[in-house]
Image (tube, coloured by chain):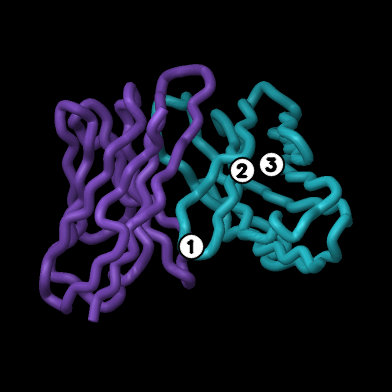
């Protein structure tokens, strides 16, 4: 059974700091991994999608890496800003990819202080 | 293009009642998945519909059901509501079977059972 874990559960950093969020999964037979952002009471916004054959993806100040063999992904946020404060979730899509089912971690709540 | 639309945004129901939530996916997306989000359990997969057929189901009681129409719009129904059903219900649409199968979420429906 696939399990996804995110560490830390919460993180508080001063503005401008670079930071890394961690995501681990127990079954390496994933199709892809997706990072999301969620603001309080809102839906999920997709940040980055990494296919199982890829090592990393970049979008602006965000960089996500994937090491499928060790069951790990990281989300790197450069030069953090107060607007980055939110909960960050990782999710894996299993197997052949012919499914819409995602398995989520519990999330990391990030606070960036001005 | 238009995103995933969920209606209504907020609902207050009484224990024992039933409720129907609606989700309109991104145009061309045939997979719609539903998730329940609570502070204690995080994001839990309810079920997935693809081409009007339920393809995957999570570990929820039979009170939770859904359906999908020929235009890919989906509804989920919860009967005999319990206090513990209070949650944010999110739906996601995907182009499954494609190489870059990215999930896009709606803003959610906040259900409060009193």
- Relative placement, left or right, of B6 versus A108 is left
Secondary structure at badge 1 equals strand
Disc 3 vs disc 2: which is toward the camera?
2
Q: Residue A42 carries which label?
A: none
Q: For residue B2, which quarter of the picture?
A: top left
Q: Mark 3 lies on which chain?
A: A
Secondary structure at badge 2 equals strand
User: In front here: B110 or B95?
Assistant: B110
- Relative placement, left or right, of A16 versus B106 is right
Q: Which colour denotes chain A?
A: cyan
Residue carrying label 2:
A35
Q: Which chain is purple?
A: B
- Horizontal and vertical percent position of residue B67: 17, 41
Label 1 near label 2: C-beta < 8 Å? no
Q: How far apart are marks 2 and 1 (CA)?
A: 15 Å
Q: Which chain carries label 1?
A: B
User: In front here: A53 or A107?
Assistant: A107
Residue carrying label 1:
B42
Does residue A67 appear in the picture of this structure?
Answer: no
**Which is more N-terminal, label 2 or label 3?**
2
């Amino acid at each position: 059974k696939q399990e996804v874990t995110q560490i830390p559960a919460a993180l508080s950093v001063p503005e401008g700091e670079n930071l890394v969020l961690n995501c681990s999964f127990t079954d390496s037979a994933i199709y892809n991994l997706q990072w999301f952002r969620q603001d309080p009471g809102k839906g999920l916004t997709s940040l980055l999608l990494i296919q199982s054959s890829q090592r990393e993806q970049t979008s602006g100040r965000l960089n996500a890496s994937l090491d499928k063999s060790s069951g790990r992904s990281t989300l790197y946020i450069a030069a953090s800003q107060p607007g980055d404060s939110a909960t960050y979730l990782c999710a894996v899509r299993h197997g052949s990819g012919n499914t819409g089912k995602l398995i989520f971690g519990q999330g990391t709540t990030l606070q960036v202080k001005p | 293009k238009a995103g995933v639309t969920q209606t209504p945004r907020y609902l207050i129901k009484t224990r024992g009642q039933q409720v129907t939530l609606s989700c309109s996916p991104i145009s061309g997306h045939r997979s719609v998945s539903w998730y329940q989000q609570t502070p204690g359990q995080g994001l839990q997969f309810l079920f997935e519909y693809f081409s009007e057929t339920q393809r995957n189901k999570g570990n929820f009681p039979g009170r939770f059901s859904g359906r999908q129409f020929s235009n890919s719009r989906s509804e989920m129904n919860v009967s005999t509501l319990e206090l513990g059903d209070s949650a944010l219900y999110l739906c996601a649409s995907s182009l499954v079977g494609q190489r870059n199968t990215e999930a896009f979420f709606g803003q959610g429906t906040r259900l409060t059972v009193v």
